[in-house]
Image (spheres, grey):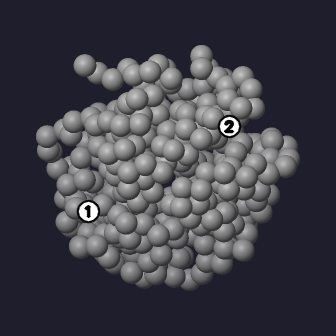
């Protein structure tokens, strides 16, 4: 049976301790946010001790101060590594069991907030201009080395290192490059992570694009990811509630969560991780959402929206790499391809799908054929 874990980001640790008996009863693990200022804190120490007593597995989701970016990436890899060393020195001194570190690879908090606003405004030129910063390739390579050194040291301590990041990196793996990773400064390729979790939040796609994909989108993406990466692939699903550093709309009801869990299981992921325990308390009650994790329901049918979103991923990736059978060969063609992506992002639900279908029918973009 596929393992299930819950993320927990903002709940006070003594509140989290109150949920430990339920997590133990249901066999759920906890990916616990540990901001760097909490290292050595008594409430954290007490929580980890109680979890060990009850047999609840906790993973360390270590986070930096907002001023340092909050999430680790190529720009703050050294600061993150130093924080990890300090944290595990404390863990070993206190003899606390915490055998897994999670590196949440995302752009710095300030950048993430700006990028989301530009996406919501459909301002693609400004988005690309912000991301195309000088020396990003050099920083990326340096960060790869920094993270690999850190992982070797963690292994010597008996600790695994997991990464969680955006599903865009699947396109890199399928193409055999690191275009999205370098653009967003998220080192996955070339780093010896013990497992990779992809934040495939259906509710976030709805927030940004204005329309919904089906659970079939989840299944297909993770099926491809499992064959693209040479490491265990985990499914981070969400969002439950509206709790998060970035404003989130969240699932509309627990049945959406149940459908996504079923899809991830069919794809054969090694673990399902739900964001988040905080949101379960905020949205309804933990029981309503936890009961949905294993709820059997009729599989959803694939939609044009599913294919449309993947087409947006692939088109954006092609713009970055300028490769493929229909690659742009001149500055004018590159500009036109960017304009096509801009047009797709600004469409309404109906017009977007109509536009994508026209591109396919005209053989303008040859990534997939519509099923007849």
Q: Which residue is drawn at 39% across and 81% down?
A: 15
Label 1 environment density (alpha carbons within 10 Å; few <14, some 14–19, many ≥20): few
Give 290 or 218, whichever is nearer the viewer: 218
Circle 1 sits on which residue?
Answer: 252
- Left or right of 213? Residue 115 is right
Give 148 or 306, whichever is nearer the viewer: 306
Q: Tell me where residue 153 appears, x and y as whole percent.
A: 73, 48
The image quarter in which residue 291 lies:
bottom left
Q: Tell me where residue 337 appears, x and y as whole percent.
A: 61, 34
Could you tell me which quadrant the N terminus lies in?
A: top left
How far apart in space, not on screen, are marks 2 and 1 (Cα)? 38 Å
Work out which residue is located at the far top of the displayed protein and give it. 325
Give 121 or 257, whichever is nearer the viewer: 121
Circle 2 sits on which residue?
Answer: 335
Q: Which residue is drawn at 38% across and 56% down?
A: 210
Mark 1: which secondary structure? loop
Report how many numbered discs are placed on residues in the image. Answer: 2
The image quarter in which residue 332 lies:
top right
Tell me if I can see residue 133 in this picture: yes
Q: Which residue is drawn at 27% across and 54% down?
A: 257
């Amino acid at each position: 049976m596929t393992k299930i874990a819950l993320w927990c980001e903002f709940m006070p640790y003594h509140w989290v301790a109150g949920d430990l008996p339920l997590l133990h009863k249901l066999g759920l693990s906890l990916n616990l946010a540990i901001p760097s200022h909490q290292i050595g804190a008594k409430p954290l120490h007490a929580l980890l001790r109680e979890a060990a007593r009850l047999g609840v597995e906790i993973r360390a989701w270590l986070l930096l101060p907002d001023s340092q970016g909050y999430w680790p990436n190529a720009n703050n890899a050294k600061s993150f590594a130093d924080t990890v060393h300090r944290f595990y020195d404390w863990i070993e001194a206190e003899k606390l069991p915490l055998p897994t570190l999670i590196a949440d690879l995302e752009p710095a908090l300030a950048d993430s907030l700006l990028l989301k606003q530009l996406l919501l405004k459909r301002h693609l030129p400004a988005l690309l201009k912000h991301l195309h910063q000088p020396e990003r390739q050099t920083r990326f390579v340096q960060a790869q080395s920094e993270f690999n050194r850190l992982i070797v040291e963690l292994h010597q301590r008996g600790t695994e290192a997991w990464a969680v990041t955006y599903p865009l990196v699947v396109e890199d793996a399928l193409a055999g490059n690191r275009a999205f990773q370098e653009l967003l400064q998220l080192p996955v390729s070339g780093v010896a992570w013990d497992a990779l979790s992809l934040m495939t939040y259906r509710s976030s796609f709805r927030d940004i694009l204005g329309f919904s994909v089906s659970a079939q989108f989840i299944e297909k993406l993770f099926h491809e990811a499992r064959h693209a990466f040479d490491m265990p692939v985990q499914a981070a699903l969400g969002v439950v509630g509206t709790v998060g550093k970035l404003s989130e709309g969240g699932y509309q009801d627990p049945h959406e969560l149940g459908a996504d869990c079923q899809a991830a299981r069919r794809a054969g992921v090694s673990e399902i991780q739900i964001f988040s325990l905080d949101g379960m308390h905020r949205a309804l009650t933990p029981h309503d959402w936890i009961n949905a994790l294993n709820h059997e329901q009729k599989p959803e049918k694939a939609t044009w929206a599913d294919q449309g979103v993947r087409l947006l991923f692939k088109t954006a990736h092609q713009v970055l790499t300028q490769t493929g059978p229909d690659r742009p060969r001149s500055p004018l063609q590159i500009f036109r391809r960017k304009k096509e992506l801009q047009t797709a992002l600004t469409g309404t639900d109906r017009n977007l799908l109509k536009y994508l279908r026209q591109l396919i029918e005209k053989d303008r973009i040859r990534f997939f054929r519509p099923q007849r």
